[in-house]
């Protein structure tokens, strides 16, 4: 790795680490909000005998677990200049040989903990579905107290809407996928709490307690779907899957540069939040080393500015060799 590339990587790493730490500090707000809402909704659900409100409370509990896991992943990803990888020692020779690759590997811990968070959501959803099924089968006799249950669900929806606004703002400012995921979660959680309010009002109006179990079952199914989706996306990121349509856009942008004869190979992948690209291009065999150096810088700038690619690893071959 030459001096110029090393300097570029150090700048990318410094910005990424600062943003990871800022994102982690912001996520403490999510933990506090979800914990408070879980306690309030669970208490109201017990007093008001509402299964759907209990399911909404456990939905917020899943938010605590998933946010805590994301924070752990961000913490590990933001560590620098350590001589170990999650307690496993790294030899000085290996640190020198791998260079920035060690830090890029640390960035993947964000994805690993997001995957675990998705698995936790699946387990919580399973508990909600089980309890809802028991209510529908056994049909216990109880009367929902609409006043206190609507109060709990209404408070949850208002707080979560405020949390969504904050998460959405900081996700754009920091260009952070963890905060973007938290933003989507808080938005759907706010809508879920709003639906819980409407469900409780519908039960009180129609005097049909079975609606409580059905709504809880639907909510549990939604949490299960979300957890599986997070688990799937994280797994795909870890095995270096990348959207082929987006890769094609990268390839077309590079191919349009006048000095590029053709794009021989292009592969993009995620390291945590960062998009990394490896590309091989064919150029005129008469092109000088200085011109190739300028072209390399041009491609790096293009990928950063147009597609927010953190780093582009470029290989150049003469067109006559193809």
Image (spheres, rainbow, N blue to C red):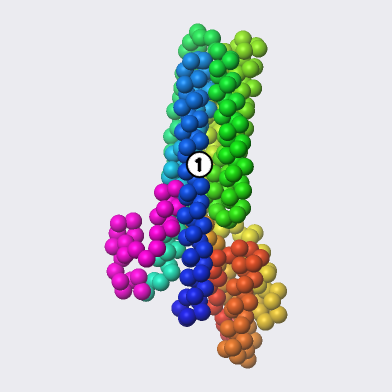
Where does the N terminus fall, quadrant-wise? bottom left
Q: Where is residue 50 in the image (x, y as percent from the top left)?
A: 52, 18
Which residue sits at x=55%, y=71%?
312
Residue 182 visible somewhere in the drawing:
yes
Q: Quadrant of residue 186?
A: top right
Tell me the SS state at disc 1: helix
Q: Which one is in front, 40 or 116?
A: 40
| Front one among 23 and 63 | 23
The residue under the point 48% across, 70% down is: 10
In the depicted structure, whether residue 282 falls above or below residue 109: below
Q: Where is residue 279 in the image (x, y as percent from the top left)?
A: 57, 72
Report whether 103 appears left or right of 89: right
Residue 73 within the magenta-colored segment of the rendering: yes
Q: Is residue 270 visible?
A: no
Q: Name the residue under label 1.
A: 29
* Extreme residue toward the top, this view: 141
Q: Give the range drawn in magenta.
A: 71-96
Q: How crowded is mark 1: few (under 14 residues within 10 Å), some or many (20 or more)?
A: some
Q: Is residue 203 above or below residue 102?
A: above
Seen in the picture, residue 30 relative to 4 is either above or below; the reply is above
Q: Determine the residue positioned at 33% across, 71% down.
A: 94
Question: Which quadrant does the C terminus fall into?
Answer: bottom right
Image quadrant of residue 89?
bottom left
Instruction: Give coordinates of residue 316: x percent, y percent.
Output: 56, 81
297 and 170: which is toward the camera: 170
Above or below — where is 4 with respect to 220? below
């Amino acid at each position: 790795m030459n001096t110029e590339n090393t300097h570029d990587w150090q700048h990318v790493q410094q910005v990424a680490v600062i943003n990871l730490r800022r994102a982690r500090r912001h996520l403490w707000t999510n933990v506090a909000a979800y914990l408070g809402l879980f306690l309030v909704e669970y208490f109201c659900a017990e007093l008001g005998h509402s299964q759907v409100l209990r399911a909404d409370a456990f939905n917020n509990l899943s938010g605590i677990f998933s946010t805590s896991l994301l924070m752990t992943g961000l913490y590990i990803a933001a560590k620098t200049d350590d001589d170990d990888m999650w307690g496993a020692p790294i030899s000085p020779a290996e640190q020198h040989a791998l260079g920035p690759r060690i830090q890029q590997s640390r960035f993947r811990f964000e994805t690993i903990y997001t995957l675990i968070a998705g698995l936790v959501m699946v387990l919580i959803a399973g508990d909600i579905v089980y309890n809802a099924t028991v209510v529908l089968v056994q049909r216990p006799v109880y009367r929902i107290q609409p006043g206190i249950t609507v109060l709990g669900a209404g408070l949850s929806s208002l707080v979560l809407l405020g949390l969504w606004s904050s998460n959405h703002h900081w996700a754009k400012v920091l260009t952070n996928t963890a905060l973007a995921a938290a933003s989507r979660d808080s938005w759907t959680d706010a809508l879920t709490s709003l639906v819980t309010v409407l469900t409780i009002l519908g039960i009180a109006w129609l005097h049909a307690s079975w609606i409580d179990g059905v709504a809880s079952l639907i909510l549990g199914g939604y949490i299960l779907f979300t957890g599986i989706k997070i688990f799937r996306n994280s797994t795909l990121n870890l095995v270096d899957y990348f959207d082929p349509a987006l890769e094609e856009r990268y390839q077309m942008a590079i191919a349009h540069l006048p000095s590029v004869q053709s794009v021989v190979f292009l592969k993009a992948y995620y390291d945590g939040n960062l998009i990394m690209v490896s590309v091989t291009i064919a150029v005129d065999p008469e092109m000088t080393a200085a011109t190739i150096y300028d072209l390399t810088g041009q491609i790096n700038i293009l990928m950063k500015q147009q597609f927010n690619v953190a780093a582009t690893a470029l290989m150049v071959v003469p067109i006559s060799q193809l």
